[in-house]
Amino acid sequence: RERKCGAWGCFDEFNRLKEDQLSAISQLIQIIQAALKSKTKNIDLLGKATEVNFGAGIFVTMNPASKEYGGRSKLPDNLKQLFRALAMSKPDSTIIAEVILFAEGFKYGNELSRKLFQIYTLSRQLLSPQRHYDWGLRALKTVLNVAGQQLLLKRITKIIQSNKDDRDP
């Protein structure tokens, strides 16, 4: 659908697909990318005439095919040629936590984010390395969102109580 409406499609963890599936998909991507490059308005995709919107884009994310990231395939050469490699760095969880805390309505997001990051770092270092312990960014974001929900609930409860007190003689 991305090719028709001009959307950008990002296929996350693309190399979790099997090698034969990746190869088949690369054929379709080659057709779409060739049309985008040559400004060809109509293409044949899986036996159907399809109109191409030149604002479309195709992106993929991958983790390395290694023991640490199980279930990933190496990309076939014909697929590697279709994309430009881009290295990513580890995000700064403290800054991300600070921004989320401020967005959730906390006054002291900078202090709280540093303390929370220290707790996560110590937990990662001191607790046993079992799969059910997740000290990554996804888990941190969940904790921050729940904290924001609790703060909102507290504020709403306070407003409701204040309105009740105003009405009570």
Image (cartoon, rainbow, N blue to C red):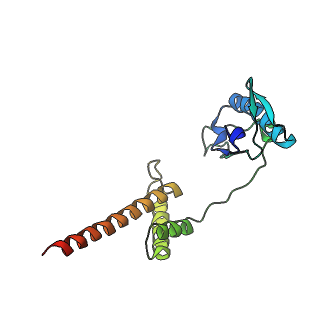
Q: Quadrant of the N terminus?
A: top right
Identify the residue shown where x is 78% and y is 37%: 32
Question: Which residue is farthest top?
Answer: 47
Q: Is residue 26 left or right of residue 107?
A: right
Q: Is residue 44 left or right of residue 66?
A: right
Q: Is residue 69 above or below residue 31?
A: below
| Residue 78 locus on image (x, y percent) | 81, 35
> Which one is in front, 75 or 8?
8
Identify the residue shown where x is 61% and y is 62%: 91
Q: Is residue 46 above or below residue 89?
A: above
Which picture quadrant has residue 167?
A: bottom left
Question: Which residue is farthest left?
Answer: 169
Which picture quadrant has residue 144?
A: bottom left
| Residue 2 locus on image (x, y percent) | 68, 40
Q: Is residue 8 left or right of residue 155?
A: right
Q: Is residue 163 above or below residue 52?
A: below
> Which one is in front, 116 or 79?
79
Q: Quadrant of the C terminus?
A: bottom left
> Which one is in front, 114 or 26?
26
> Which one is in front, 164 or 77?
164
| Residue 43 locus on image (x, y percent) | 79, 31
Q: How many marks?
A: 0
Question: Which residue is farthest right?
Answer: 38
Q: Is residue 127 above or below residue 1?
A: below
| Residue 85 locus on image (x, y percent) | 77, 50
